[in-house]
Image: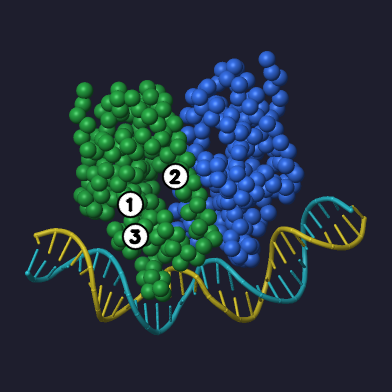
Chain colours: A blue, B green, C cyan, D yellow
Amino acid sequence: MRFLHMPHTLILNNIAKHIHLTPDEQAVFTAMLQPRTIKRKQFLLTDGDICKHSAFVTQGCLRGYTVDKNAIEHVLSFAPVDWWMADMYSLISQKPGILNIEALEETQVLLLSKHNQETLYKQVPKFEHFFRVLIENSLVASQQRLIDGLSLTAEDRYNNFCKRYPTLINTLPHKQIASYIGVTPEFFSRMRSRK
Amino acid sequence: MRFLHMPHTLILNNIAKHIHLTPDEQAVFTAMLQPRTIKRKQFLLTDGDICKHSAFVTQGCLRGYTVDKNAIEHVLSFAPVDWWMADMYSLISQKPGILNIEALEETQVLLLSKHNQETLYKQVPKFEHFFRVLIENSLVASQQRLIDGLSLTAEDRYNNFCKRYPTLINTLPHKQIASYIGVTPEFFSRMRSRK
DNA sequence: GTTAAATCTTAACCTACATCAACTTCTCCA
DNA sequence: TGGAGAAGTTGATGTAGGTTAAGATTTAAC
């Protein structure tokens, strides 16, 4: 029997949105989680590392970004509380990744190792269902963002971002949102002043 | 007992890349598939439809695209032989979709209905594993394309496309590749002449 | 096999967004 | 709590890629 402290109730609720777990299954799962604190501007992973965990954010916020050949950063994703984050490419291939995952503020995560994740798939097949659904939703979001990038102006992408992530607008630095949307901080500032 | 004709060997090999099926499981699966031919310029799905099937291409080539408010088409994906295609957003939500899926040439597909796909997950859980891996790979490709869109010039994106899909370069009309890369056919033509 | 339609190319001009630079305002931690 | 560095702003100028239009070439359907 285990005492369920706060971080676990959050992740168990996250999972309960898609699958039902028995108390035993919950125990198996939570025993696999490894908590970790990442200070502001510290990294969970840097580019070139092999990604060995999926991270679930219980406090704070992460951002995943790449750096191009001109040393410009491009934000691939944010992970606020209740979101999952990983360098998917590296996690599934176990080759050196391309993402830098940095804490934007003091952040707490629960780490699930790739090994434990695979064990879970075998011992509790429902988890394979859960992660399939999770990844499907990510894919749909990623495809929508691709389409937006191809068909909308920067201003429309900004408006979409405001609608889709109203809470993030107030917590994220503007330059990070600019990078996510695909414009420079300068142009982002001009866009905002035009309203 | 069923006679395995050509189209089924292709899809069974596609699946065998990730999971092993017993002859019985193969039979259950192939019995669920519904073959269909789509003539050149005909549609498997149009925008506003609810997507009820995943399609596996056994001959020809599909393209999935959206149309923006200026009536300009944007290619989200191609599906040549041995690839899967669907409007993922609509398929998982069962709401009206945004994709038009058109045959670029006479195309044959095997359709797996959403209902059968879910039955399969229950009866043969390995299929949940298979589709999870398939979707994971799609997600990684989609994320890489997002990063490329944020960090590369049109010319670099074109070079990447040539490297990643060397066979498609010769079979697809230039205007479709231009659309996928995110440039106009005119600019695409200029890029090509600069070499 | 012909022909109409679709695709591709080239050129002149245009615009959304980038770059550079200088300044102002935040913010965080010593 | 003050000050140094980060973040945001504003203006002048540059450019990758878009638009329009017209002609050349390919393609496919009858």
A175 in relation to B88, above or below:
below
Label 3 sits on a secondary structure element that is helix
Work out whether mark 3 precedes mark 1 in sequence or the reverse, and give the earlier one.
Answer: 1
Query: In this rendering, does residue A195 appear at all?
Result: no
Kind of residue at disc 3? Ile
Q: Which residue is mark 2?
A: B138
Q: Decide if residue A173 is on the left or right side of residue D23.
A: right
Are labels 2 and 1 assigned to the same chain? yes
Mark 3 and mark 2: Cα distance apart in space? 20 Å
Label 3 CA crowd tier, 10 Å (few <14, some 14–19, many 20+): some
Are labels 3 and 2 assigned to the same chain? yes
Q: What is the quadrant of residue B34 in the picture?
A: top left
B27 in relation to A95, above or below:
above
Q: Which residue is mark 1?
A: B63
Which image quarter holds the N terminus of chain A? top right
Q: Which mark is residue B169?
A: 3
